[in-house]
Amino acid sequence: MIPIVVLSGFLGSGKTTLLQHALAYYKEKGLKPAILMNELGDVNLDGSLVNGQAPMKEMLSGCICCTIRGDLGVELMNLADEYKPDVIIVECTGVANPMEIVDAVTDASIYSSMILQSVITVIDAHQFLDFASGNERSKSLRLMQDQLRCASKLIINKTDLLAAGELQKVQALVKELNPYALTVSTQRSDVDAGIFFSTQGEERMDVSRHKESAVDIKSKHSHSENHLQTYDHDNHTDHHDHDHRDHAHGHEHGEHYHSYDHVVVHTHFFGQPVPRSEFEQLFRSLPAEIYRAKGIVRFLESEGQMMFQFAYRELEIIPIRPQKPVNDVAVVMGENFSASEIEGQLRKLEAAEKPLSSS
Ligand SMILES: Nc1nc2c(ncn2[C@@H]2O[C@H](COP(=O)(O)OP(=O)(O)OP(=O)(O)O)[C@@H](O)[C@H]2O)c(=O)[nH]1
């Protein structure tokens, strides 16, 4: 039986950071992992962070819990057949409802010798606290709550960004939502990998309990929300602008709660290097509705490509040396923001002249 570990958690919470720890652990133990990675956009930037460390299949331009769920079982079986891994890690999009993934994995396990080992949910402690204490962006809060509830293991991440006393508040909120999961608080998703990723089968996920938990969520929320989920990946423009609100398909069974009809993903391919200070300024002044962006960019003032990561108001920029050519691209994600406005701002950056001093 191949154990399947599902990594869940809201956009930018620290799933890929956790995946890197898992890969290091498996390498040390001499185990062969395989990865199934799912991204909302057309480009897999997270994949380039773990490239070469393990066989990987990508499911792009859709969310496995919804539009491309049917493919999940097939991709899992392909990975298992092709690579005979000791473990498969599935990294979900930040807007996936893990209960749907649990269903898909359990369906796949009927036909193939794999078993769901755990659902690990990572939360950005600071973001969760902000969302939990305000009424706005309530749809994303409910999605985070679903992700928390479905977890067999929970990571309260980014504790470095919390003020004194806030960690206790987050821990209490999390415990209230999911008293069953093994819960740890971390920086940079730095968990005890032996506990989180051991493939020794002493613990298998009790799917029935988590299904009950999801039903609780439904009975708590379904009266106030419709179950229509929207997701569009046919709506391409030149700049790969996806607005997931346009293409609707309902789930008539209404079994699980979905809440990402409000999520917008905008992809912009850069044609030019941009000025670094204006680029940073743009991210400092983004509307609160944009809580995740990532990509690869070149700056006018320096040589080479940089990877940038913007996760809930924090911007990180690191130089990269890709082994094969990669596009300069920005993927911007958030809730009901104006894709055309951000597109205009990014194009404006590209129109900037190279400073005389560095020419
Ligand atoms: N300050 C701080 N930043 C962190 C921490 N953990 C991760 N990050 C940063 O947060 C950003 C997002 O981390 P990822 O691991 O890519 O998050 P993710 O959940 O995989 O993101 P998506 O797949 O896009 O949903 C990166 O810039 C990380 O370096 C942490 O504990 N503290």
Image (cartoon, rainbow, N blue to C red):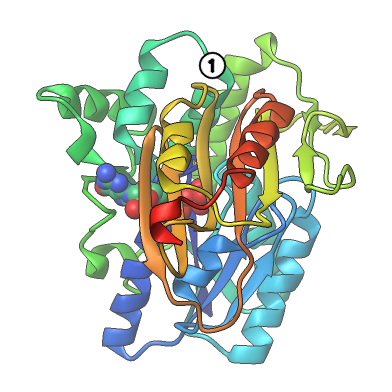
The reply, left or right, for residue 249 in relation to residue 305 is: right
Residue at horizontal 61%, vertical 71%?
A: 326
Looking at the image, residue 204 lies above or below residue 310: below
Q: Which of these two is toward me, 280 or 191?
A: 280
Q: Position of residue 115 (x, y in %)?
A: 55, 69
Residue occupied by mark 1: 138
Looking at the image, residue 220 lies above or below residue 172: above
The reply, left or right, for residue 276 in relation to residue 102 is: left
Q: Which of these two is toward me, 190 or 342?
A: 342
Would you identify the image quadrant in which residue 257 lies? Answer: top right
The reply, left or right, for residue 232 in relation to residue 56 is: right
Structural crowding at the residue carrying mark 1, measured as other residues with C-alpha within 10 Å and reported as few (<14), some (14–19) or many (≥20)? few
Q: Which amino acid does label 1 sit on?
A: Ser
Q: Position of residue 20 (x, y in %)?
A: 36, 68
The reply, left or right, for residue 124 in relation to residue 46 is: left
Residue that protrudes farthest toward the front in the picture:
356
Would you identify the image quadrant in which residue 195 lies? Answer: bottom left
Q: Circle 1 — which element? A: helix
Q: Position of residue 13 (x, y in %)?
A: 40, 44
Residue that protrudes farthest toward the left in the picture:
164
